[in-house]
Amino acid sequence: MSRTPRVTVEFYAMARRRAGTDSVLLTAQTVAEALHVVADSFPGLAELSRGPDSSSPYLVSVNAGPFLQDWDTALIDGDRLLILSADAGG
């Protein structure tokens, strides 16, 4: 029996302000599952439960890789999920 991966979710820019913390440790099998946990735990980030549509105010990355279009991406133990406000660019 495999256990659910433990992942760290890091918040940047407006996502950090809305979460009130810079990171949280949680368990999730997929990015979508992790984002639902985040949305339930931090009401200011409820938009994350909608998924990666074009109106989402957030960009999501695993281990500082490319921003994801598919939130069904599987996670493995130790992954770092980064959540960045879509308007935080430079």
Image: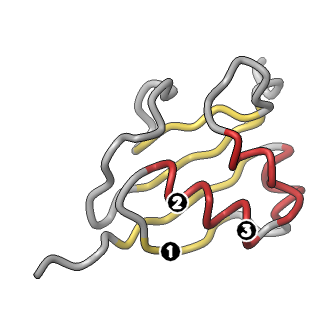
Mark 1 in CB contact with mark 2 (< 8 angstroms) = yes
Q: Residue at x 37, y 73 (%)?
A: 6
Mark closer to the observer (3, 1):
3
Position of 37 with respect to 58 (left or right) is left
- What residue did someone put label 2 on? 34
Quarter where residue 23 is shown: bottom right
Cα distance, mark 3 to mark 1?
Answer: 12 Å
Q: Residue 24 location, x and y as percent?
A: 61, 71
- What residue did someone put label 3 on? 40
Q: Residue furthest left?
A: 1
Helix, strand or loop under label 2: helix
- What residue did someone put label 1 on? 26
Cα distance, mark 3 to mark 2?
Answer: 10 Å
Q: Which amino acid is tagged 3?
A: Asp
Label 3: how many residues lie within 10 Å, few (<14), some (14-19) or many (20+)? some
Cα distance, mark 1 to mark 2?
Answer: 7 Å
Position of 65 with respect to 67 (left or right) is left
Along the viewing direction, whichever of 27 and 67 lies nearer the viewer: 27
Q: Residue at x 86, y 64 (%)?
A: 43
Q: Which amino acid is tagged 2?
A: Ala
Q: Earlier in the sequence, mark 3 or mark 1?
A: 1
Rendered view: 38 above or below 51:
below
Q: Earlier in the sequence, mark 3 or mark 2?
A: 2
Rendered view: 30 above or below 6:
above
